[in-house]
Image (cartoon, rainbow, N blue to C red):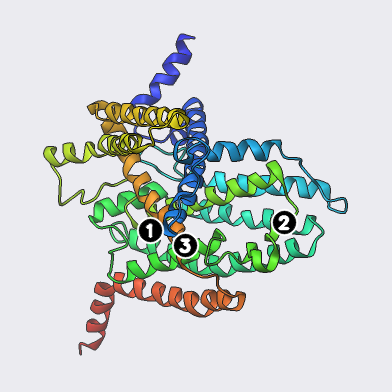
Amino acid sequence: MHAFIDYIQSYLSSKQTPGAAGNLFWATVYILLVFGGLSVAVIAMNWLERKILAHMQVRLGPMRVGPHGLLQPIADAIKLLLKEDIIPSEADKFVFWIAPFIVVLAAFTVFVVVPFGPQHAITDMNIGILFMLGVSSLSVLGIVTAGWASNSHYPLIGALRSSAQMVSYEVAMGLAVVSVIMMTSLETGTGTLSMIDIVRSQQTQQEWFIFKFFPLGLVGFFIFAIAMVAETNRAPFDLPEAESELTAGFHTEYSGFRWSLFFLAEYSAMIAVSSIAVTLWLGGWLRPFPNALNGPTWDLVFSLFPGITFLLFAAICFYNTARMPKHPLFRIQTMGLAGFGAVLGLIGLVLLIPKVSVRVGDIYWFVAKVAAFMYLYIWYRGTFPRYRFDQLMKVGWKVLLPTGLALLILTAVVAMRTELWAQMTGALRP
């Protein structure tokens, strides 16, 4: 028992990720934390999307279940678990059963290499980007098998659309990622595929890669941002789930718990690709202006942000509690909203403790950047009309692919400009 406690405590002084340190206990803890945190994030995203879209359309959104509809995602989850699980009589039952799990597994496995901080990752692979691209591509297998196993026309068409869409946009996405790898090679001469080393390279070069070789880094970021929306089948590229043409696409025949797995996988994939974009272009866990605004004073100011954020959320809850109708029928909802605000306020006070704020600062800035991407997903859905399928393919093959190739060539030329200029001037000398 004493040896096991020493084994647990030995990692606390380590500067590595649990996987790199070979500590199975802490690796398991990190896996459970990522799984639990991702599940909570999906629940929160479900509520936020419905409320934000409602306010964009000048309506209220969920209001009945809990104060301001806060318990609506839980009610939806209970409903889906209790619904009858139907498998069509002519479906391939085993493939139909396993397809949703393939999609969920692919979406969750990407987070093995996502770094929430210098040590806050399950493991740090030296081929982290290749692992991420390979595993995220596996989700198309689950979608195709779901559409084929349903033995129905609409799911099959939706699955084929999705496979064509993912293949088309993964090429441009890969080119944008390669441009980032080339940017990491400036200080060592050899690029890195490690997600943690890419963030450290941005820290060393004192510049987020979205601003590197301006405007080349920005162009690469836009290519990835468009491709990741198409990869996750979200509006305006949600052709595999076009309700007006395909009923619901590849998951038309699914119901209850299995349908909820597709829903969970979609939101998890959105968070995964947003995390990758943040890591590659926006400095990962680095706070804003880490080199320009440094020193003990600035470190103290930025360390207060996590606690202040939760206290602000708590203040919003208390403000809305005071505005609730003073009627006996609203008493429970008023108490619930006040209780939720009290919990957020308590978390905010805990995060103001210096030892806690230092440890969670990296995670806070990473999550804040990802949250900005998630808001953009909602904004796109409430703003842009759906593309036609021929327009979708045109953007992927005739716009993003040539732009990605040009970006790759220009990034190589700009990165090697000094060496190329020296060779050209040397060749011109008599």
Disc 1 + disc 3, Cβ < 8 Å = no
Which dot marks residue 382? Answer: 3
Question: Between 292 and 247, which is closer to the camera in this rendering?
Answer: 247
**Residue plotted at (31% across, 30% down):** 345
Q: Is residue 397 above or below residue 169?
A: below
Distance from disc 2 to disc 3, alpha carbons, whole Å, reads 23 Å
Question: Between 178 and 280, which is closer to the camera in this rendering?
Answer: 280
Residue that label 1 marks: 191
Instruction: Please name which of the two marks, 2 or 3, marks the residue nearer to the observer.
Output: 3
Position in image of residue 62 (x %, y %): 50, 45
Instruction: Please name which of the two marks, 1 or 2, marks the residue nearer to the observer.
Output: 2
Question: Between 95 and 402, which is closer to the camera in this rendering?
Answer: 95
Q: Quadrant of the C terminus?
A: bottom left
Instruction: Please name which of the two marks, 1 or 3, marks the residue nearer to the observer.
Output: 3
Position in image of residue 176 (x %, y %): 43, 66
- Amino acid identity at mark 1: Gly
Q: Earlier in the sequence, mark 1 or mark 3?
A: 1
Position in image of residue 334 (x %, y %): 40, 31
**Residue plotted at (55% across, 67% down):** 237
**Residue plotted at (17% across, 39% down):** 301
Quarter occupied by residue 55: bottom left
Residue that label 2 marks: 252
- Amino acid identity at mark 2: Thr
Quarter occupied by residue 6: top left
Q: Is residue 163 left or right of residue 300?
A: right
User: Which residue occupies the extreme front position in the image?
Assistant: 327
Distance from disc 1 to disc 3, alpha carbons, whole Å, reads 39 Å
Q: Secondary structure at mark 3?
A: helix
Instruction: Report whether residue 192 is seen.
Output: no
Quarter occupied by residue 316: top left
Q: Residues within 10 Å of mark 2 (few under 14, many from 20)?
A: many
User: Which residue occupies the extreme bottom position in the image?
Assistant: 430
